[in-house]
Image (spheres, helix red, strand yellow):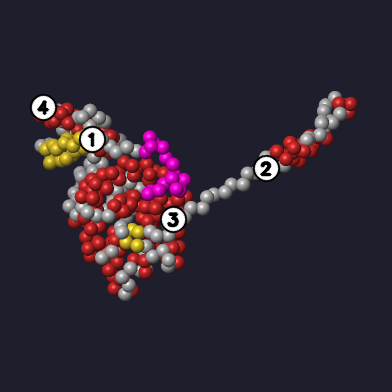
Amino acid sequence: MIVFILMLLSLWVWPGGPEAGPLPAVPPEALAAAPAAATEVRFPYYTYPDNLTLCGEPVPLKEHVVREAMDREFVLVVWSRAQTTMWLKRAHRYFPELEKKLQAKNLPLDLKYVALIESDLRHRAHSSAGAMGPWQFMGPTAQHFRLRVGPAVDERFDFGQATDAALDYLKSLHQQLGSWALALAAYNCGEGRVQKELGLQQVNSYYHLALPEETERYVFRVLAAKVVLESPKTYGFDIPADALYEPLEYDEADAILTQEITVRSLAAACGTYYKYFKEELNPWIKGTSLPPGSYHFKIPKGSAARFAEAQRFGRLEPKIETPAPPPAKPKSKP
């Protein structure tokens, strides 16, 4: 296109008549140096190692069905650039705490990727089925693993407590099923369903087991996340260190409330605002106030003395019930 335009210009007569003459001919070297009209865009082809493990267990990638299932999830993770970028940012905040808990319980570090797949590491995540929090617990399962779930408090949203419960659950599933891949499948669709299918199909490997499509993809998605997040630069994710989310810094404080107290006053007592106190530090608080009881709070770093003083001198604001308006009087007929 550029060459064609230059040729037309070389034949064009400037305004002013024929005596003005044509433009000088374009030198051949200038034509050769002209850029192509459209630059060809090439997308890199990324691949993953031929030998992969999940929680120390080998993945049978030589089986074409397994390889193709892994390909699908790997390509989706690599090319979901926005989502994977956010994974990397949040992982920098939450993985250090998660890794400490895994090491304390002598569990494989790969299990941290389960939380990533379950919720994108968003502690307020919830599903249409009713699963809540970073580990997507259903209510009965959460209560079985000693999480409080009620009208005022839902500990499924507390990253630390939900992680402790999830790791206990995963450990229990591994003890029942004998492999981590099966344990993760059971975490996704329930141990009852996995045990039923194992008995029905008479196989003992996750990779040979027919399960609901979501569960068949689940373990491979965990694997794909592991591959990319362990070596992000290999796959084109070069995020500056100062763009990663730092772990939250906070102190911890216990409080015994003898009356219903507003969350607003709890936040003010430690020098912060309602949204930060509730949504960032204590997302397990469901409403705008807490009933009488014993609580363990995360509070801004350096505010422990101020918070204790507010409790000691009764500076926490009780919730005041607003009286219901009187019933409307019936209109009299004219």
Quadrant position of residue 160 = top left
Q: Are marks 2 and 3 in contact (CB under 8 Å)?
A: no
Residue under label 1: 250
Residue under label 4: 313
Asked if the magenta segment contains residue 111, the reply would be: no
Mark 4: which secondary structure? loop
Vertical relation: 186 (above or below) 156 = below
Precedes in sequence: disc 3 or disc 1: 3
Q: Give residue 48's mark.
A: 3
Quadrant position of residue 278 = top left
Mark 1: which secondary structure? strand
Q: In x, y percent, where is residue 100?
A: 24, 46
Q: Are marks 2 and 4 in contact (CB under 8 Å)?
A: no
Task: Give the residue at x 45% y 53%.
Answer: 76
Mark 3: which secondary structure? loop
For the residues marked 2 and 3, what is the alpha-carbon distance in whole angstroms?
34 Å
Q: In x, y percent, where is residue 151?
A: 21, 46
Precedes in sequence: disc 4 or disc 3: 3
